[in-house]
């Protein structure tokens, strides 16, 4: 859990500890990390790190080694301030944590799970990413970025799982799937609340054939 020194990250850590899990906690404040670790020293490993620093990835891997592996990764690090006057340092520091740090840590976890072959990657974002908060321009924009970025990771993972674990379609089938997929993606009035992962479309096509209306209903 990255960002375990306060807020949601700390509370999630406490829940995992109560359930008996081995937990790795990380954050910038060493004293708070040690206070949390001391609650269950046989279960909890701690590592100070700053997601905006280049060595954060190396420190994450050191923490994983201390714990003995990683099945779940939660990124709870983030900052946000009201900034009516758009003071530049506030805007840039928000972007450094919520964009640069976010990319750094989610990439590290993603590639770890990719090599391992399994794992759960979760992040804490904000409803501000769906419609901006007037007093917090950088915060709102960075949360929108996070929502889009994690959507891509989910999409990319589903496609990899499909090709890695499901019997590969024939060349003819794959061509047809991709044609239908492009139609769905390019239809402006498609009654879909999200861009469907490729695997979902394959399942819908297998049921509905070329009937786009039925495909939309299934999705």
Image (cartoon, grey):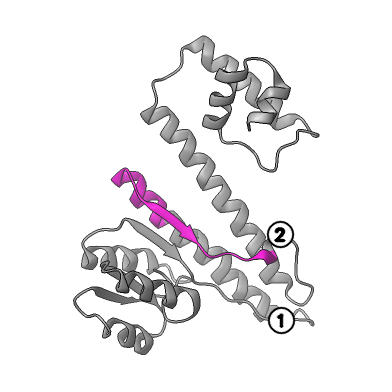
Q: From the viewer's perspective, is residue 115 above or below residue 129?
A: above
Does residue 24 appear to the left or right of 12 in the view shown? Answer: left
Q: Callout 1: helix, strand or loop?
A: loop
Give the tally of numbered discs: 2
- The question of residue 111 being in magenta is answered with yes
Q: Residue furthest left?
A: 42
Does residue 125 appear to the left or right of 71 in the view shown? Answer: right
Q: Residue furthest top?
A: 172
Q: Position of residue 139 (x, y in %)?
A: 67, 71
Instruction: Determine the residue positioned at 61% across, 74% down.
Output: 94
Q: From the viewer's perspective, is residue 46 above or below residue 158?
A: below
Q: Earlier in the sequence, mark 2 or mark 1?
A: 1
Q: Residue 74's mark?
A: none
Does residue 67 appear to the left or right of 196 in the view shown? Answer: left
Q: Position of residue 137 (x, y in %)?
A: 74, 71
Q: Callout 2: helix, strand or loop?
A: loop
The stretch in magenta equals: 108-128
Instruction: Determine the residue positioned at 63% across, 26% down.
Output: 181
Q: What quarter of the picture does the C terminus occupy? A: top right
Q: Position of residue 213 (x, y in %)?
A: 73, 23
Look at discs 2 and 1 and give the one toward the viewer: 2
Q: Position of residue 87 (x, y in %)?
A: 73, 82
Q: For residue 98, which quarter of the picture?
A: bottom right
Q: From the viewer's perspective, is residue 8 above or below residue 64?
A: below
Estimate how packed mark 2 is, as few (under 14), some (14 to 19) or many (20 or more) residues with alpha carbons within 10 Å. Answer: few
Q: Nearer the viewer, residue 17 or 170?
A: 17
Pointer 2: what residue? 130
Q: For residue 161, which quarter of the picture?
A: top left
Q: Residue 82's mark?
A: 1
């Amino acid at each position: 859990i990255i960002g375990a020194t306060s807020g949601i990250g700390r509370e999630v850590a406490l829940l995992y500890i109560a359930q008996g899990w081995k937990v790795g906690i990380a954050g910038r404040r060493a004293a708070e990390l040690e206070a949390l670790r001391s609650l269950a020293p046989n279960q909890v490993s701690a590592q100070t790190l700053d997601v905006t620093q280049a060595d954060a990835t190396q420190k994450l891997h050191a923490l994983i080694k201390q714990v003995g592996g990683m099945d779940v990764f939660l990124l709870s690090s983030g900052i946000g301030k009201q900034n009516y006057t758009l003071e530049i340092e506030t805007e840039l520091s928000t972007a450094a944590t919520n964009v640069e740090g976010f990319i750094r840590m989610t990439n590290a976890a993603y590639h770890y799970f990719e090599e391992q072959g399994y794992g759960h990657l979760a992040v804490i974002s904000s409803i501000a990413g769906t419609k901006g908060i007037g007093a917090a321009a950088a915060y709102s924009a960075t949360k929108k970025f996070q929502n889009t970025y994690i959507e891509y990771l989910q999409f990319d993972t589903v496609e990899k799982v499909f090709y890695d674990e499901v019997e590969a379609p024939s060349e003819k089938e794959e061509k047809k799937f991709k044609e239908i997929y492009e139609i769905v993606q390019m239809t402006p009035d498609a009654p879909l609340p999200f861009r469907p992962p490729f695997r979902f479309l394959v399942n819908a096509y297998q049921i509905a054939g070329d009937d786009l209306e039925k495909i939309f209903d299934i999705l």
